[in-house]
């Protein structure tokens, strides 16, 4: 047996199956999921159903934390607001390090966490795409390491095709 040999069962990542209107949706832990839609209907439905089986979720969003709580009232969710306004739960959009830190702090608490990053398009207005891509790659490593799920709702019309293609390299698409 070599130093690189592993117990196969210890390498398997669990999954969660959500009963959706159009049929079951299986989300594997250890993956990033892009939910590409012009409107957030699909993302809202997925997060609502996921919050019924997942105890604690972190959300970094363009929505005010009060709006997040209204949208998902049953979820135990820590919410950060992407905003230029001062506040303890606010993150300026040009501070990608704080976005990554908020997600990492939550996911590093344990295995099988869930995070939502809603506002990638907004971050793109305030940052160079290379910096966003680097953050995305680091989040991908973190999600795999912690066997977590990262959901990213986005409107594909608001990103350049090359940028969207790069993001898709590290993520699964939910249609």
Image (cartoon, rainbow, N blue to C red):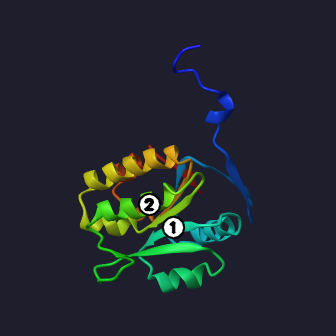
Residue 137: image tag = none
Total marks shown come to 2
If the image is split into quadrants, where does the C terminus sit? bottom right
Q: Residue furthest top?
A: 1
Q: Which residue is mark 1?
A: 58
SS for tag 2? Answer: helix
46 left or right of 115? right
Counting from the top left corner in percent of width and height, residue 99 is at 36, 64
Judge left or right: residue 144 versus residue 129: right
Residue 2 locus on image (x, y percent): 54, 15
Q: Tell me if label 1 and label 2 are in contact, CB under 8 Å.
A: no
Q: Is residue 36 left or right of residue 120?
A: right
Circle 1: is it few (<14), some (14-19), or many (20+) Cα within 10 Å?
Answer: many
Identify the mark nearer the N-term, 1 or 2: 1
In the picture of the structure, the residue carrying the numbered disc 2 is: 105
Q: Position of residue 158 (x, y in %)?
A: 37, 65
Check disc 1 and report its element: helix, strand or loop.
strand
- The crowding category of the residue bearing disc 2, from other C-alpha atoms within 10 Å (few below 14, some 14 to 19, many at least 20), is few
Of residues 106 and 24, which is closer to you in this image? 106
Of circles 1 and 2, which is in front? 2
| Residue at figure coordinates x 37%, y 59% from the top left | 100
| Residue 114, above or below 2 | below
Q: What percent of the width, then of the height, locates residue 49?
A: 69, 68
Query: Height in image: 85 above or below 155?
Result: below
Instruction: Give the quadrant of residue 123.
Output: bottom left
Q: Is residue 79 visible from the viewing direction of this image?
A: yes
Residue 158 in sight from this viewpoint: no
Quadrant for residue 160, please give it: bottom left
- Quadrant where the N terminus is found in the figure: top right
């Amino acid at each position: 047996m070599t130093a690189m040999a592993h117990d196969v069962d210890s390498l398997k990542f669990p999954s969660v199956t959500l009963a959706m209107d159009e049929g079951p949706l299986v989300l594997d832990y250890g993956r990033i999921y892009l939910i590409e839609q012009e409107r957030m209907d699909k993302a809202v439905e997925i997060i609502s159903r996921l919050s019924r089986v997942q105890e604690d979720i972190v959300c970094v969003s363009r929505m005010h934390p009060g709006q997040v709580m209204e949208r998902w009232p049953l979820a135990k969710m820590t919410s950060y607001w992407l905003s230029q306004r001062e506040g303890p739960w606010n993150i300026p959009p040009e501070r990608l390090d704080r976005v990554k830190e908020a997600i990492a702090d939550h996911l590093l608490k344990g295995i099988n966490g869930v995070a939502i990053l809603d506002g990638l398009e907004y971050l793109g207005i305030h940052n160079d795409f290379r910096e966003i891509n680097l953050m995305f790659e680091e989040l991908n490593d973190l999600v795999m390491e912690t066997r977590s799920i990262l959901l990213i709702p986005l409107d594909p019309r608001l990103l350049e095709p090359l940028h969207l293609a790069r993001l898709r390299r590290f993520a699964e698409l939910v249609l």
